[in-house]
Structure formats: C-alpha cells, structure tokens
Amino acid sequence: MTTQDVRDKAHIEALANELGAHLIYDATNTGGNDGPRAQIELREVHLRPSVVDYWAALHELGHIATTELDARKIAYQYGLLGVQTVIDEARAWQWALDNANRPPDAAAKADIAISMASYFYSHATIPVADPTVAHLIRLVGPNPAIDENLDEYSRPYRDVAHDIWTRANALAGAV
Ligand SMILES: [Zn+2]
C-alpha cells in the first residue's frame, strides 16, 4: 500500500467509527455486482479486501449516514422508490464529497458520473428537481473522464453513460 492508501484506509476507519458502522473486507467484485456495498439496516459496509477504493468506501459510508429507511418505505408505498433510490445515491455521493480529505479528482468525478448515470438509466428518471442531484451533476460537469474510468462491468454501458450524462447536464442547466 502507498502512503496515501494507508492514510485513506485510516480515514475510512475513523469515519466508520464515528458512524458506528462496521467495515467488512469481503466484497470481491468477481462475476457480478458484489463490489463495495452498504447494508444499511446492519450498519455494515462491505469493501474489497485488497484495494483501498477511497471514493467507493466513502460513498457506501454515505449511505449509512444519509439513507433513511423510513423515507424508502414511504416512497415504495407510493410507487416512488425509483426516484428515491436515485436521490439516495446522490446524497451518499454528496456525503462522500463533504467528508473526503481532498477534493475529487477526475477519476472520482467520473465514478460519480458513471454511478449516477447507471441509476438514472435503471430507474428511468433524472430527478434534477432534487437539489442534491442537480448539484452533483453541475459539480461533475459535462465532460467527465468516463471512458478512462469504466470498469469491466460498466463497459457495455459506455454509450448509455455518455448519453445520459449529457442529458442530465442539459436538464440540470435548465433548473
Ligand atoms: Zn450507492
């Protein structure tokens, strides 16, 4: 591990402590979507064992800190879970940005764009009326380094990510 990895890991552990979250290094990301993830009810964050994926870890801690299970239940009841899920993603990213020990670099901004674009796509909504969603889109801007930062699982969605991110910028610019 580099010096920055050691510092990042310590920072993630300190934030997890503050939140009463339990870090579990078991996410392998082989053959499916079992990469970094939060289990909010259990206050668990599952991370990959061998790499310090600082922004992904911050994002998952952001779910522990910000995702309201009651709000999700109500959204589900009224058929609004898709929109709520996208807003929850944006809030977890915003928490990551607010708690990071450095500003987001181009790779971190691309991660945010790829992640948010995939949620916009899968839930067929770009809820720019939500201030956090609109803020994130404007913060990342219209030309994130998507191609350089797609992992192998996201690569098939390259064109979709570009198109949706362009559309999101057009919408966020209009509100
Ligand atoms: Zn998330």
Image (spheres, rainbow, N blue to C red):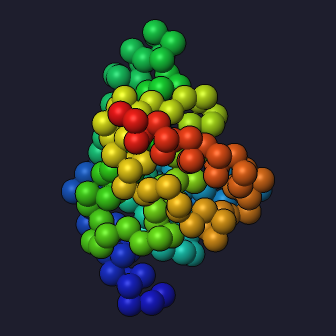
Q: Nearer the viewer, residue 7 or 93?
A: 93
Q: In the orientation shown, which residue stands out farthest toward the top?
A: 78
Residue beneath the point at 51% across and 70% down: 107
Relative to 84, say whether 52 is above or below: below
Res. 88 image quadrant: top left
Relative to 49, say whether 115 is above or below: above
Q: Nearer the viewer, residue 136 or 43?
A: 136
Q: In the orientation shown, which residue stands out farthest toward the left?
A: 18
Relative to 99, say whether 132 is above or below: above
Residue beneath the point at 61% across and 28% down: 124
**72 left or right, relative to 98:** right
Q: Is residue 141 visible?
A: yes
Q: Nearer the viewer, residue 90 or 50?
A: 90
Relative to 10, say whether 129 is above or below: above
Task: Give x and y (percent) for residue 145.
Answer: 57, 67
Res. 14 image quadrant: bottom left
Q: Is residue 47 visible?
A: no
Quadrant placement of the C terminus: top left
Res. 120 image quadrant: top right
**81 left or right, relative to 148:** left
Task: Give x and y (percent) for residue 81.
Answer: 49, 22
Task: Give x and y (percent) for residue 42.
Answer: 41, 41
Counting the numbered discs, the total is 0
Q: Nearer the viewer, residue 60 or 137?
A: 137
Q: In the orientation shown, which residue stands out farthest toward the bottom?
A: 3
Task: Give x and y (percent) for residue 121.
Answer: 63, 37
Residue beneath the point at 33% across and 81% down: 7
Residue beneath the point at 29% across and 45% down: 65
